[in-house]
Image: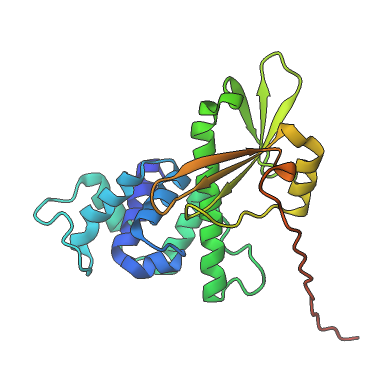
Amino acid sequence: MTQREKAILCGLFLSRCDTAGLERLGFASFKEAYNILGLAIGVKPASIKNYRDELDPLFPNKRRGWHGRPLRPHCEKVYETYKSHEVDELVSLIARFTGCDFDSAADDSKCHNNFTAHAKRLLTGRAAENYFLSNFNRHPEFTGSSAKDVTQAGCGFDFALTFSGNHGFFAVEVKGLSTANGTVSLTENEYRKAAELERNYFLYVVRNFDESPEAVTIRNPAYSEFPFVRRERRIIEVTWATHI
């Protein structure tokens, strides 16, 4: 799918499913959905809103949408392809093209509350990472650097920033918050790496997705003005066995 088709599909999902669609992905408002989905797929949030509005007359909801205006060919193509898809199929498509594995949570991820929280967390994280990639060079200490995505390498951070002619690097861990304030957690691996790298480690928090996303950067987070409190959770795994 092209980026435009992905944005149209998100608009179709929000138009057809309306507030139930927001609830399915854990969003508190349409604005939050536009911001997170838009950043997660790399389009302007307003584009998703416009596509939702254009498709609104074709689905039963309280909004008027773009009544009296013909559906544009690129929107009609997506509408005809996906109008009859089940909601779970649309959710799976959104998961696939944003690179989020909604089913990778614990065994009970299919439980409604766990699924929605997990889906939103993954989408918010992806949106925050894309926000970082689009804006990191605006940060004075990052200017002139190149970013390498190491999210899948288990390094204890998401991006390694390198500078031409400099053999060192900055480690950046990206987190996302829907609201202007909230709790940010580091894994044991992330906190250990932050303590090891000290001033070469940055926590980059993209917050306020429910209104207008903005970034807060914390250098040396393990020893910063924001103290982290250790939380330990023990998980008991139960299995059933038989001898044959």
- Image-based side of 28 in relation to 239, left or right: left
Q: Residue at x 50, y 32 (%)?
A: 135
Q: Residue at x 46, y 63 (%)?
A: 25
Res 22 quadrant in image: bottom left
Q: Position of residue 167 (x, y in %)?
A: 76, 19
Q: Quadrant of the N terminus?
A: top left
Instruction: Pick whichever, 120 or 181, lies toward us.
Output: 181
Instruction: Pick whichever, 240 or 134, lies toward us.
Output: 134
Q: Colour scheme in the image? A: rainbow
- Image-based side of 184 in relation to 41, left or right: right
Q: Position of residue 183 (x, y in %)?
A: 60, 57
Q: Residue at x 27, y 57 (%)?
A: 80
Position of 82 relative to 20 (above/below): above
Q: Position of residue 118 (x, y in %)?
A: 57, 63
Instruction: Pick whichever, 67 or 186, lies toward us.
Output: 186
The residue furthest top is 165
- Image-based side of 178 in relation to 13, left or right: right
- Image-based side of 146 in relation to 243, left or right: left
State whether residue 77 appears in this view: no
The residue furthest front is 225
Q: Position of residue 136 (x, y in %)?
A: 54, 31
Number of residue marks: 0
The residue furthest left is 68
State whether residue 109 appears in this view: yes
Q: Residue at x 71, y 53 (%)?
A: 228
Position of 130 relative to 209 (above/below): above
Q: Quadrant of the C terminus?
A: bottom right
Position of 57 relative to 37 (above/below): below
Instruction: Pick whichever, 135 or 211, lies toward us.
Output: 211
